[in-house]
Amino acid sequence: MLKQPAANWSMSTSTDRWPPLPVTQVLNDLAAALGHHHKTVLIAPPGAGKTTLVPLALLQADWLDPAKKIVVLEPRRLAARAAASRLATLDRTRLGDRVGYRMRMDTKISDNTRIEIVTEGVFTRMILDDPALEGVGCIVFDEFHERSLDADFGLALALETQAALRDDLRLLIMSATLDGGRVAELLGADVPVIESKGRAYPIELVHRPRQPDQKVEDAVAAAIRFALQNHTGSILAFIPGRAEIERTAQRLSSLTSDNLIIAPLFGAMDIKDQAIAIETPPPGVRKIVLATSIAQTSITIDGVSVVIDSGLSREPVFEPRYQTTRLETVRVSKATADQRAGRAGRTGPGTAIRLWHEGQTRTLRPFDPPEILRTDLSRFMLDAASWGTSKPGQLPLLDLPPEAALAQARENLVNLGALNEQGQLTGKGKQIAAMPLPVNLAAMVSAAPDSENAFQRALLALAITHVATTTREIDLETIMQDLETGGLKKRRKPLAQRARRIVSHLELPENDKNPQSIGRMLLDAYPDRVAMRRGAQAGDFLMANGRGVAVDEHHRLAAERFIIVADLTGKAARSRMLLGASLTLNELEEGLGTLIEEATTVTIGPNGDLNAFRQRRLQALVLSSQLMKLAPGPEIEAALSQWVADKGLDLLPFDDSHLRLLNRLRWLHRQVGAPWPDFDAPVLLEDIDQWLRPYLAGKTALSQLTAAELTAALLGRIDYELHVQIDTLAPAHFLLPTKRQAQLSYDPHKPQPILSVRVQELYGLATHPTVNGGATPLLIELLSPAQRPIQTTNDLPGFWDGSWADVRKEMRGRYPKHVWPENPRAEAPTMRAKPRN
């Protein structure tokens, strides 16, 4: 614990009515630290009481202006609402009076509110709308270890506000498991880190490893039955996702009774249904809460003494190439596993049952990766532009966003018209930024042609973000109809009220009485997710961005020719649509006509047969295709060039002269070096458009290339000044003493070219022949009159003076009709035998 000197602050004696939670031991130090340093880090484990007691304690600090309030950030709506309710109870005031909360679609505050619990996204809107944060005296970042993008961004903006506008503003970072020193370093060198040791209730760790072929729901259900028989109290089971939760509940359905409640808890539930899961059960009733990671922090489920941890969580993974986010089941981190286990010891001794081998805990990653490193940064980039920076990486962030993800986000915002090419906010961008909606859906609303259509688009956006995830239906048209007249009708009124507020600032003409379909409206949100059915197989679609997506073949949308995908899951090779709508070709052309391109496409069959088609395309989608008469043109040139790039240089009509030229050029590159470029096949194929394609003009087949054109194409890769040096440095032939031109053999991987020649043709030659300006001697392969190798030499004069005598002796016996002089230097060269008498 870090002790602070006395400060101008005081604590009320009313704290005696607070529960004796461990964090009370550091409240005085905490208030003093904030009084002196204005920035402080508090590390306290789950159950220490930081969320519940710290805001109430700080409310009594003398440094807090009575006219200013404390804003507490919570990562989730459920946690914000639960924390506000608990604080109001301890404060003995009505919720919404001194203690209130604010979140999307649910706010309960008043003019008397001094402690305001807000979700992290709401805080971002607060500080963007009011950078000076008038009326706020202290900001508390609770559960900061979760490292959400909104929390990281909110802290960065708060730090800039504190530095530039509000030096009296206090910032408190609270976390259960966090590298406190690293956070303190971001805040400043002198920032204190205060630690609360937490409650010392023992937690027994029990390991019941899940078998490799055992489903998660089966392992969890078996562990719950084990816990019911061997332990008392309620049970909290952590399960990766909604589907597994529902299957687990199904396997436990026979256990339900008046004394046992099974309560699901996941993010897609209505917040009122979520609240049921965390309510205290009636006396004598045990509760089994089947929860996702939503129950890891911030909320307390009374009566829980047993935690069952599957060791898995479902995390969003953003794919920049397709601008989509998919959910992936991964192993939890060590910090998360510890937090989950800690839920069993909130009110007394507990048991944590882990469904993995004890030794596997050591292999878990220490912490979960921060969201800023693995998510779509479009909203972050847009909000940063609203803050006034086009380079959000320069903000005071604990982790810098990846440059590739920033570039993708910038491209998306430019395509939506929210940013200009310089990264500055446009008028449309200001509209989009002001809407509490995901960026693409806000762009859809902003693109409305009239006021009534804007309302319908806003209603659709809210249905996607707040309603669709709670249903099993994938057709947004059905969901919207259900909001109007079906089982979801009771949820329409609050959605409609909020939709009206969202579009109230848009200056649009009145309804032109031309309503648009769901699919047509979605075109302005997800133009790259238009999907077209592939072939005759129902449910198999290709999106404009090149990613395949499947729809259940029995669903109505599976038979449509065109659909638009609002949400999907799974990897690129096996994606499945979660939400979407049908679309007509006319709607597609109306909405994205400027993006549809007409071009000639050429295909090449396995035998080199060319076919030309006139196509209308929307990125990867071929909307129509018409066979055309084959005629020379850029499309044919591109197709032929690409065919060679795909299949290799062997497709070209090279003759021996071209292959020998290539070997000479490759030899010069390897043995001489600069400025001779690389002529190896991979390099030639990589830049084939630069050297070959110009010579394909006017041709419809590779066979139409002449030998001269191929030679010119190859030589076109080197500067003209080097052309004349090829024959000087790497000549194709050597002029023998007999005046015959003997061909030289070049191997790029060997330092010396080879001259193969009958020895009689070298008579009279006293010096060894060379290339490369005399720097490289030829390797001479000496042949017999029968063209068989006799010997190789790098030193012809040395050969004449040395081993020639032995060679002469052997050759005279074999070939007596040929000349074998004792002194070959003085003999005239010849290609013939001795003349007959």
Image (cartoon, rainbow, N blue to C red):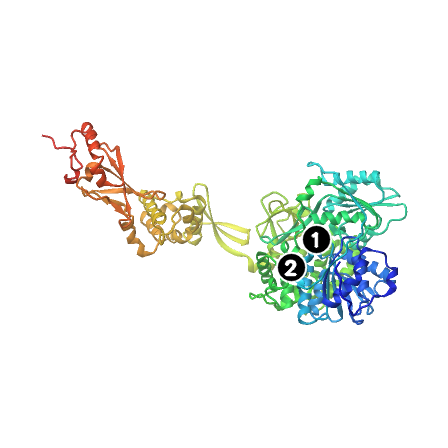
- Dot 1: what SS? helix
The residue lying at 30 percent from left, 53 percent from top is: 723
Give the mark count: 2
Q: Mark 2 points at which residue?
A: 398
Which badge, 2 or 1, comes first in the chain's sequence?
Answer: 2
Question: What separation in Å lies between label 2 and label 1 (alpha carbons)?
Answer: 39 Å
Kind of residue sitting beneath label 2 = Leu
Seen as rendered, the residue at the extreme left is 837
Q: Quadrant of residue 39?
A: bottom right
The residue lying at 58 percent from left, 62 percent from top is: 414
Q: As rendered, which of 258 and 12 lies closer to the eye?
A: 12
- Where does residue 256 sit, x and y in percent of width and height? 85, 41
Mark 2 Cα shell of 10 Å, populated few (<14), some (14-19), many (≥20): some
Kind of residue sitting beneath label 1 = Leu
Mark 1 Cα shell of 10 Å, populated few (<14), some (14-19), many (≥20): many
Q: Name the residue under label 1.
A: 476
For residue 255, above or below residue 38: above
For residue 589, above or below residue 345: below
- Where does residue 628 sit, x and y in percent of width and height? 46, 50
The residue lying at 72 percent from left, 66 percent from top is: 37
- Where does residue 229 sit, x and y in percent of width and height? 84, 38
Q: Can residue 101 be seen in this view?
A: no
Q: Can residue 342 be seen in this view?
A: yes
